[in-house]
Amino acid sequence: MPAPLHAPDRTLVPALRAKIDRKTKPLGALGQLEELALQIGLIQQTLSPALNAPHVAVFAGDHGAAKAGVSAYPQDVTWQMVENFLAGGAAINVFARSNGLGLTVVDAGVAHDFGTGRGGDGVDFVSAKIAPGTANYLEGPAMTPAQRDEALAAGAAVIADLAARGCNVVGFGEMGIGNTASASLITHCLTGTPLAECIGRGTGLDDAGLARKQALLATALERHRLAGGGDAPLEVLAAFGGFEIVQMAGAMLAAAVRRMVVLVDGFIVGSAALAAIRLEPALRDYCVFCHCSAEPGHAAQLAALNARPLIDLGLRLGEGTGAALAWPMVKAAVAFLNDMASFESAGVSDQDTE
Ligand SMILES: O=C(O)c1ccc[n+]([C@@H]2O[C@H](COP(=O)([O-])O)[C@@H](O)[C@H]2O)c1
Ligand SMILES: Cc1cc2nc[nH]c2cc1C
C-alpha cells in the first residue's frame, strides 16, 4: 500500500450541498446523480471535480474448481475471451470505445501463455500472472498467503501505472470461468447471507447444474471450516480466490489511496470490493456501484454495503460492461455540478419561502 487509506474529509459537504441546491432545478430533482456529484466532490476535495483519462481494467484469471463443474462453459473460454479482448471484439471493447474509455487487460492468472508484446490497437495488456490458475478449493486453499499478498501488490501496480498516465477514475471488470462460484463463497463468508442465497446460475447453468454448484460450494465451505478457516477477509480471499478477484481488491485499495473514483461492475467485481472494504472500510466512500447484476448474490453484497447501483439492466456479463455503461451517468454528475447554471447566474426565481 503506497499510503494509508483515509475516508474523504467531509468538511466540504455543506459547500457541495449548497452548490448542488443552487442549481436551476427543484431541490433534489436530480436524485441519485446529486449524491454522486457530492461523492466525487468529496473524493477530489473540490467543488469543481474533473474526471481525467477514464479507464477500465479487466482482470482475468482461471479457477481450479472450474474443472469440478461449477460453470456452464469450459475453462478455455477464459483465455479465448482474453484473446477476444486483445483483438477488440468483446462487449467491453465495444462499450469502452463508444464511451471514450481506455482499456487494460490484466492476466492475473490465466492458464494460458499469451506470449510477449501483446496489446496495442487501443487495448493495453499487463502480464501479472501469479500462477496458471488457482488450486481447486474443493481440495485445499485456492492460493497460499504469499500468492494472495503477491496478487494484492500486483493489482496495486496496475493502478500505479494508470495513475502515472493521468487516470483518476477507473472501472473494474473481470473474466474467469468459474468466478461466480468464488464470488458466492466470498459473499457468504463476508456478509453472513446463507450460502444458497449467494449462489446463482452464472453463465447460465440449468437446474441440474445449479444443484451441482450448490452442493460443490457447500462442500468447499465445509472443507474450509474443517481446516479451521474463518471469515477474516484475507483468509477468505486465499481460501476461495481467484487471482483476478484478489488483484482487483488490491487495485481498488491502491486507487482509493490515490483518491481515484472506483467504478464497481457486477457480482464478481463486487466480491472484490466487499473484501477490500472489509479490509479498509474507508474504501467504501471511493466506490460507485454501477449496476445491479442478475446474479442473485449481488443483492446481498449491495445490501451489506448499503449501496444503490446506478443502473439495473439485468446484465450478467462481467468484463466491466456495467461500469462502462454507467460511465455516461458518472460524467453527467460531474458535468451538472460544474456547468449547470444557478438560480442567481440564470436569474431564475427560487421557491417561495413563505
Ligand atoms: O458480473 C457479473 O455480475 C457476472 C455474472 C455472471 C457471470 N459473469 C461472467 O461470467 C463468468 C463467470 O461465470 P461462471 O458461470 O463461469 O461462474 C465470468 O467470466 C464473469 O465475467 C459475470
Ligand atoms: C462467452 C463468454 C464471455 C464472457 N465474458 C465474461 N464472461 C464470459 C463468459 C462467457 C462464456
Image: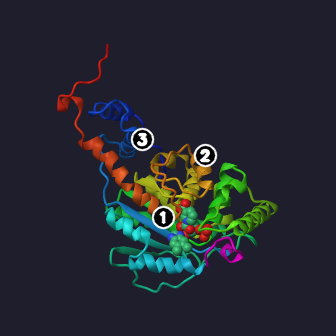
In the image, what residue type sits under mark 1?
A: Gly
Label 1: few (<14), some or many (≥20) within 10 Å?
Answer: many
Mark 3 or 1: the one toward you: 3
Query: Which residue occupies 38% across, 55% down?
Result: 327
Q: x, y percentage for residue 352?
A: 29, 18
Q: Which residues are magenta?
A: 65-74
Is residue 282 toward the left or the right of residue 37 in the image? right
Name the residue carrying label 3.
32
Label 3: few (<14), some or many (≥20) within 10 Å?
Answer: some
In the image, what residue type sits under mark 2?
A: Ala
Label 2: few (<14), some or many (≥20) within 10 Å?
Answer: some
Q: Is mark 1 within 8 Å of ligand 1?
A: yes
Q: x, y percentage for residue 264?
A: 48, 56
Mark 3–mark 1 Cα distance, whole angstroms, equals 23 Å
Query: Which residue occupies 79% across, 59% down?
Result: 225
Q: Determine contact: label 1, label 2, CB under 8 Å.
A: no
**Chief secondary structure of the magenta portion:** loop
User: Camera-side residue: 208 or 122?
Assistant: 208
Is residue 279 toward the left or the right of residue 285 in the image? right
Element carrying mark 2: helix
User: Does the segment drawn in magenta span residue 67?
Assistant: yes
Name the residue carrying label 1.
173
Name the residue carrying label 2.
304
Is residue 315 toward the left or the right of residue 23 in the image? right
Q: Is residue 232 visible?
A: no
In the image, what residue type sits under mark 3?
A: Gln
Q: Determine contact: label 3, label 1, CB under 8 Å.
A: no
